[in-house]
Image (cartoon, grey):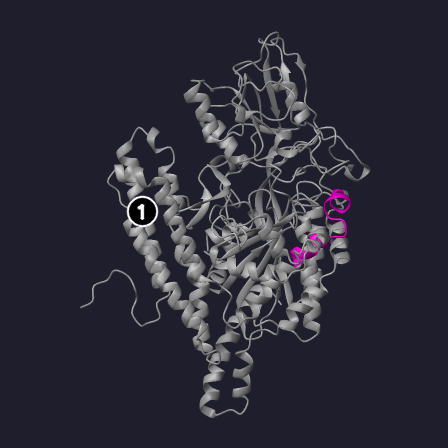
């Protein structure tokens, strides 16, 4: 059965069910009371218990071994044929159906016969200190002919020769320091930036904005190694000096050839020369062993203390090299290229019993830069085991109230392409029908504690689900922390309430982005992470050739208990959302969080707003009205007659669609890729999220804008949009025949 056809049947099924109930009511059908009684019961808790017991560590281990056995970059045969077909066949045979969605999109690759590199070049063209063109093989499992050399996707090809400048993390503030504090002219320079803090694409965008001709990215040990630099992989999990981080530098989501529309057969595609958002300057990544060659020879003043990494050298900002290298330049040689390729999403589904047209969507991407044993295959291994376990429960007689969809995304690493194209293609179906999207990009970035990102409406569900999952760490259990929740709250307590764990906001770092930012679907992303005492920018082996099965099974998760815990949490959340009569969405928590954001904004910007005679009162009033509306809806939900399917449907729709009310079709600050008015990726760091992002963008660096009048008008506009949007969201929860808002009664 094709998925689109199946989804249509689900919708017809629920309409037929309601009509049947109404007909049966007047016909006094003898089975009606039994049907209504069955529909009014939450899912049997025994199935949630059985699901957790069914999820097996050895199955996850075998899954990871299979998926990470070979490199599987997007567009490759291993990725689009071998792995995609394996998942499709598995789901088609074990679930209620599966479908593959194909998209022809623009991808990017390094030239295997003409590798990218960096070198110091003298006036006569002689090159020295040439960077490694491939990562050093440290064990036989990394030695595969299909490994792609380190590169940054969508970098233009080019050969740049210029003075080096050290730009720290490449954030806007770093460039402001160089150009404002030091009055440095960056035109034509080659920027050296360390990975971390912000999305690499934002680093490149900043570099080209401030006039740099090219950029070199490296992983400083301060961000990827704790302790002695002599004890790195393969002896420990810290990044060796030969490791280089691959990654995209595209600053938009989805296929750049078909913005805002799916890259299907009938799509109109731009010519590559007409794409406005591709990077304009060449860029390539290197390891920190190579970075030391260049940074150690740099001229200029000593870098600020916050800019200093962990290499054994004096960090200087440049420009240029010091004596005796002052006549030499830094050469950046990039021969990457862009090409159209077909990528594939695989979607499997379990059809719901009573509400088949309501979907709980679970997703993980499949593509990896190299072997991807952590990102993404640790998540893929967990998802495949979760789907297997649910299939076993189907055999035992279980069926969820609502439908569950499993999604294996293609080309996430290039810019969330697979999930974005699917959302663009299926948005008219997904928008009104999806309860929530639950993402696991990777199961673990460490083995210390759970880390979760989510919109506030899912916070309560996350807490409750974590309390049901056994703690995978025996030392934590001995210390009295028996569940995942216990360790989570002990390690990451909320700054507002130490009795609950901290949950972060969703930026644009994974496949939840298009669900939340385009459709307004409540979303969450979970994983295990490392001890926060380490000031790391990510797990150390991120996007390198060393991210292998050996790393995971020998060092990070011996026994695969942490993978199991994530799969169990994922499954518990899915079953609660798909089986409870009233969906487990906490609208009051949303209101509480929003009022906290209002207070934080007043604290941050209040004095400056007052100076300009601008008030935040309309937003405060709207937030208070929103809080009252959520309390009223929660009360109706608690007192709902669960034997009345129409009343249940109405309340569930109000809860499910609440997030949609925060979508501005014109985009946040004009950015059509980001439309959620309450939470959206930070204007200068797509990985991070901003609360009230339009206002945050309007206020950023406002004091340096030469057109003060226009900027402050934008601030007033953003405040107006916030008040309107929050009031509109409150009106969606009104339970009466009139539409709430600012109308005048006559």
Magenta residue span: 551-567
Residue 68 point in image, percent of width and height: 73, 47
Residue at (41, 72) in percent of width and height: 636
The quarter holding residue 148 reads: top right
Residue 684 point in image, percent of width and height: 46, 37
Closer to the camera, 2 or 195? 195
Please, is residue 303 above or below residue 173 in the view?
A: above
Please, is residue 697 above or below residue 563 in the view?
A: above
Please, is residue 665 above or below residue 543 in the view?
A: below
Closer to the camera, 678 or 134? 678
Q: Is residue 147 left or right of residue 325?
A: right
* Quadrant housing the N terminus: bottom right
Magenta-drawn stretch contains 101: no
Magenta-drawn stretch contains 554: yes
**Residue 5 visible somewhere in the drawing:** no
Q: Main secondary structure of the magenta part?
A: helix
- Identify residue for label 1: 719
Q: In this view, does 727 lie to the left or right of 146?
A: left
Residue 212 point in image, percent of width and height: 50, 23
**Residue 179 visible somewhere in the drawing:** yes
Label 1 secondary element: helix
Task: Name the residue furthest right.
Answer: 140
Closer to the camera, 637 or 579? 637
Q: In this view, does 630 lie to the left or right of 481?
A: left
Q: Callout 1 environment at 10 Å: few (<14), some (14 to 19), or many (20+)? A: many
The quarter holding residue 159 reads: top right
Task: Name the residue furthest front.
Answer: 479
Task: Name the residue furthest top.
Answer: 324
* Quadrant housing the C terminus: bottom left
């Amino acid at each position: 059965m094709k998925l689109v056809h199946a989804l249509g049947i689900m919708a017809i099924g629920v309409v037929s069910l309601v009509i049947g109930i109404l007909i049966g009511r007047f016909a006094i059908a003898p089975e009606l009371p039994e049907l209504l009684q069955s529909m009014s019961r939450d899912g049997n808790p025994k199935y949630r218990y059985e699901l957790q017991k069914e999820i097996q560590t050895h199955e996850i281990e075998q899954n990871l071994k299979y998926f990470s056995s070979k490199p599987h970059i997007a567009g490759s045969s291993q990725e689009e044929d071998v792995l995609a077909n394996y998942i499709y066949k598995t789901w088609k045979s074990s679930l209620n159906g599966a479908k593959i969605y194909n998209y022809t999109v623009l991808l990017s690759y390094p030239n295997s016969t003409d590798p990218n590199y960096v070198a110091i070049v003298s006036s006569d063209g002689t090159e020295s200190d040439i960077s490694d063109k491939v990562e050093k093989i440290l064990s036989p499992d990394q030695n595969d002919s299909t490994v792609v050399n380190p590169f940054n996707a969508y970098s233009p090809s080019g050969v740049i020769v210029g003075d080096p400048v050290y730009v720290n993390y490449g954030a806007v503030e770093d460039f402001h320091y160089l150009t404002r504090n030091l009055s440095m002219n960056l035109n034509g320079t080659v920027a050296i930036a360390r990975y971390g803090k912000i999305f690499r694409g934002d680093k490149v965008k900043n570099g080209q904005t401030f006039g740099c001709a090219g950029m070199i990215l490296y992983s400083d040990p301060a961000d990827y190694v704790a302790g002695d630099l002599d004890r790195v992989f393969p002896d420990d999990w810290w990044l060796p000096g030969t490791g280089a981080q691959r990654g995209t530098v595209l600053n938009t989501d989805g296929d750049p050839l078909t913005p805002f529309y799916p890259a299907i057969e009938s799509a109109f595609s731009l010519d590559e020369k007409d794409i406005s958002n591709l990077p304009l300057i060449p860029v390539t990544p290197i390891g920190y062993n190579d970075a030391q060659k260049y940074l150690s020879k740099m001229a200029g003043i000593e870098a600020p203390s916050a800019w200093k990494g962990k290499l054994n050298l004096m960090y200087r900002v440049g420009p240029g090299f010091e004596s005796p290298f002052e006549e030499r330049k830094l050469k950046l040689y990039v021969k990457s290229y862009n090409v159209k390729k077909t990528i594939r999403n695989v979607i499997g589904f379990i059809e719901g019993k009573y509400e088949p047209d309501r979907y709980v969507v679970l997703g993980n991407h499949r593509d990896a830069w190299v072997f991807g044993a952590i990102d993404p295959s640790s998540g893929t291994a967990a998802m495949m085991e979760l789907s297997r376990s649910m299939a076993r429960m189907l055999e035992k007689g279980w069926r969820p109230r609502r439908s569950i969809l499993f999604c294996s995304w293609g080309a996430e690493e290039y810019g969330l392409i697979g999930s974005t194209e699917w959302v663009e293609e299926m948005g008219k179906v997904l928008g009104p029908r999806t309860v929530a999207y639950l993402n696991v990009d990777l199961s673990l970035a460490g083995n210390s504690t759970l880390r979760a990102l989510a919109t506030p409406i899912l916070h309560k569900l996350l807490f409750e689900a974590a309390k049901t999952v056994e703690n995978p760490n025996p030392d934590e259990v001995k210390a009295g922390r028996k569940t995942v929740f216990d360790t989570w709250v002990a390690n990451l307590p909320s700054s507002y309430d130490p009795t609950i764990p901290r949950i972060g906001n969703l930026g644009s770092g994974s496949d939840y982005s298009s669900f939340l930012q385009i459709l307004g679907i409540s979303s969450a992303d979970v994983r295990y992470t490392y001890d926060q005492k380490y000031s790391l920018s990510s797990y150390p082996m991120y996007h390198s050739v060393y991210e292998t099965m050996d790393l995971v099974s020998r060092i990070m998760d011996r026994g695969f208990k942490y993978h199991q815990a994530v799969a169990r949490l994922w499954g518990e959340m899915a079953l609660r959302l798909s089986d409870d009569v009233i969906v487990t969405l906490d609208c009051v928590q949303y209101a509480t969080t929003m009022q906290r954001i209002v207070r934080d904004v007043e604290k941050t910007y209040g004095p400056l707003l007052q100076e300009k005679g601008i008030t935040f009162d309309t937003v405060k009033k709207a937030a208070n009205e929103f809080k009252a509306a959520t309390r009223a809806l929660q009360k109706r939900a608690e007192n709902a007659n669960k034997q009345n399917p129409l009343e249940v449907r109405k309340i569930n729709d109000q809860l499910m669609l609440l997030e949609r009310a925060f979508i501005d079709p014109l985009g946040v600050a004009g950015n059509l890729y980001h439309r959620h008015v309450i939470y959206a990726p930070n204007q200068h760091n797509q990985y991070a999220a901003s609360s009230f992002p339009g206002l945050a963008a309007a206020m950023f660096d406002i004091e340096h804008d030469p057109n003060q009048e226009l900027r402050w008008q934008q601030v007033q506009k953003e405040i107006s949009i916030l008040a309107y949007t929050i009031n509109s969201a409150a009106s969606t929860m009104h339970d009466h025949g009139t539409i709430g808002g600012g109308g005048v009664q006559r």
